[in-house]
Image (tube, rainbow, N blue to C red):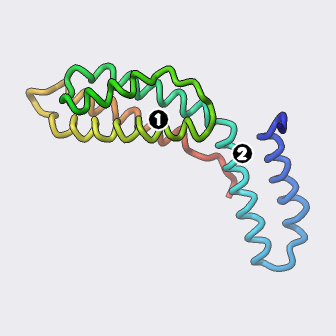
Amino acid sequence: MIPKPGESIAHICARIATDLLPKASDDYAAADLAFLTVMLSMVQQDFERFADVHVREHDEMCAIFRGARDRLPPDLQARVDAVLGHDQDTSLLASALNARADVTTRLLIDVHAWAEGEAGPEAAWAVDLDREIWRFLDRYAANRAYDVAL
């Protein structure tokens, strides 16, 4: 294994930007190398944060599901129970984390759609759930922001 893959990718980016880019034979090649450098820096950022983001977001979604479970209709309760029953899955492989995120994110979307349909003056809890999910989605988007120089 490469002991510090994030740093290795950063070194590749620096090499492209400081050595190969100035030697590009034409504007197209220079633009292509610049694009590759930006993309590699984004890969480096994702590599560094991938598991942390997935694990934290899974925990946050499970907390939302636990809080909402008793108010949900039976079909959503069953799906929540299935997700919570696998809450201790410990594989940090990217494929396993992505598969788990696919299930929990789809469930969050369905719970959110249901809560939005229930929200109203007689269902303040649904309004609160809707707001809680929107706050989570704001954090979800922020977790995926890139710091790149363009």
Observer-nearest of 128 and 3: 3
Q: Position of residue 149 (x, y in %)?
A: 69, 53
Q: Position of residue 144 (x, y in %)?
A: 55, 43
In this picture, residue 136 sits left or right of residue 71 = right
- Look at label 1 and name its amino acid: Arg
Q: Residue at x 8, y 27 (%)?
A: 122
> Who's the residue at 16% across and 25% down the image?
124
Q: Residue at x 19, y 28 (%)?
A: 74
Residue 133, image x and y in percent? 34, 33
Image quarter of the C terminus: bottom right
Element type at mark 2: helix
Is the residue under label 1 in contact with that under label 2 (CB below 8 Å)? no
Residue 23: mark in rendering: none
Residue 33 % position (x, y)? 78, 66
Q: Residues within 10 Å of mark 1 (few under 14, many from 20)?
A: few
Q: Is residue 105 left or right of residue 4?
A: left
Q: Quadrant of the N terminus?
A: top right
Give the residue at mark 2.
44
| Image position of 44 (left or right of 52) | right
Q: How many marks?
A: 2
Residue type at mark 2? Answer: Gln
Quadrant location of residue 3? Answer: top right
Mark 2 vs mark 1, foreground winner is 2
* Residue occupied by mark 1: 139
**Does dot 1 land on a helix, a strand or a loop?**
helix
Which of the two labelled residues, at mark 2 and mark 1, occupies the earlier sequence position?
2
